[in-house]
Image (spheres, rainbow, N blue to C red):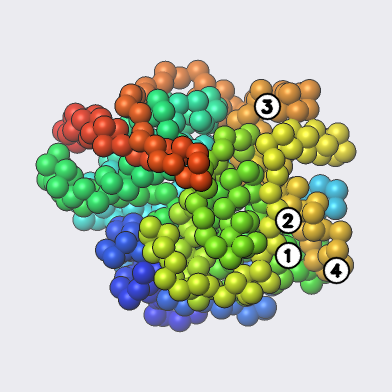
Amino acid sequence: MSNEAINFVSTNGPETATFCQAVMMGKAPNGGLWLPQRLHRFSIQEIAAMSQMSLPEIAYQVLRPYISKKEIPDLILVMILERIYDEKVMPLSLIKVGDRYVLRLDQGPTLAFKDIGMMFLINILNYLYQKNDSKLGVCAATSGDTGGAASENCEGLSSILCITSFVKGKPSDEQRVFMTTNQNTIALQLEEGTFDVCQGLFNWLLDDHKFAREITGDPTYFGTVNSINVGRLLPQMIYVFWAYSRLLTVEKEPQMVPFIPSGNLGDATATEMARRMGLPIPRIGIAHNENRVFHSFLEKGVYEARLVHDTDSQSMDIGDPNNMPRLIKLFHGQMDGSKHMHFPPNLAEMRKTFISHWISNREHREIIRRIFKAYGYESDPHGAAGHAACDQFIEGFPEDWKAVVYQTANPDKFRELMQDATGKRPVATAILEKKLGMKETVLKILSPPDYVKVKGEDKAIPSIAQYQELKEILAVEIPRRLHAS
């Protein structure tokens, strides 16, 4: 492994940054997203050796090429990885379910795959800001699990305050409580809107350096922990390598075909990066609900943001995926932050790499019911989309191709849906039972979004009134919390 860390480049080009610079900036100054300038390549022997490694050891191998030892020494990086990826804190499992494997990513602190990337990013940010004796307000717009993972992992940290935004009724009760019961979080609830509105409001906030200076004295106080931050993206490669390492222990020279429930396309991007780092992955399956932006792009070759449809797999209810510019860049195109395509990607190469399928909303419960009846296995609604995509393609696989469906959220977070689909209420986890018994604190944004006509339908976009309310809340809450600390 080289002593020189790989730097990062903006998808808008040509700006570059080190890992720590990229993580602290969130987005590049020119509005682009950060990607490694190149991807470290493992030999097949190095990948085989991972079958004997623990999760923290695999994490070190995957992440170290991108992080300068001058910025984060070995001792610090190893200490962070061993603490957050201890199997008692973040258990992973790969289990056989019929003709496929399921990668369970839903057993961590907030019962969702977001824990794996978020734990790393928050701990790195806390280390960097503590070292600089400074403070950070991290913004996490969420349609389901991102906000809870950010909130839970910020709890108890002196350098970081978490700010989440979500739409009323959009996260399930079981998802919401991971945001609204923590002391170190400002939980903002939009009475009307969509995830894209939440993300849009935070994008305005991230660019509002004047407001940040007024209330904190620091124009760069606000940062992001959504998947636009490369510090969230890189650790998502870890469990792709971990899954293959465990597949090696039960299958002879397997080729792994992941099937990924997809919304913002962070997992899809990280899995593609892991493939390019040497994992034997002949295809990547992308699973969608009715908000099938990437599926339509592969079909038509034209990027079109969609009006968001509410579905049972709500974390995937995204009509304008954040990570699309990264995927375009990986396939030799360029798309800016407003999703304008400057240069088209190599579409033929993308179609060769990705296989894609989407399901209607009514199919979620049908798939959950069928899997439970056949195998006694409880799939969450997001995983159901993954199983549907797997069903679509697995029959034609060569013998050494092994399907791995990502289960990204715990069924316990969707109790009513699961009971309706299977006739059985999920066994309550101790983590969730504790959260459901705690007091919630929610600050409401009452103003409606604006609406624009898109193909004859109304699309919600952030309104000035909503942003003004957001600023009024933060102008009170943030100074109070900074003074208290």
Q: How many marks?
A: 4
The percent coordinates of residue 10 (x first, y second) are: 36, 69
Residue found 69% across the figure and 49% down from its top: 358
> Is residue 143 shown above or below 10?
above
Quick check: marks 2 and 4 in contact, CB under 8 Å?
Answer: no
- Residue carrying label 3: 417
> For this rendering, which residue is in front, 349 or 250?
349
Mark seen at residue 398 = 4
> For this rendering, which residue is in front, 111 or 361?
361
**Residue type, label 1:** Met
Residue found 77% across the figure and 58% down from its top: 403
Ranked by sequence position, the earlier of labels 2 and 1 is: 1
**Residue type, label 2:** Val
Quick check: marks 2 and 1 in contact, CB under 8 Å?
Answer: yes
24 vs 405, left or right, is left
Ranked by sequence position, the earlier of labels 4 and 3 is: 4
**Residue type, label 4:** Pro
Ranked by sequence position, the earlier of labels 1 and 3 is: 1
Residue 112 found in image quarter = top right
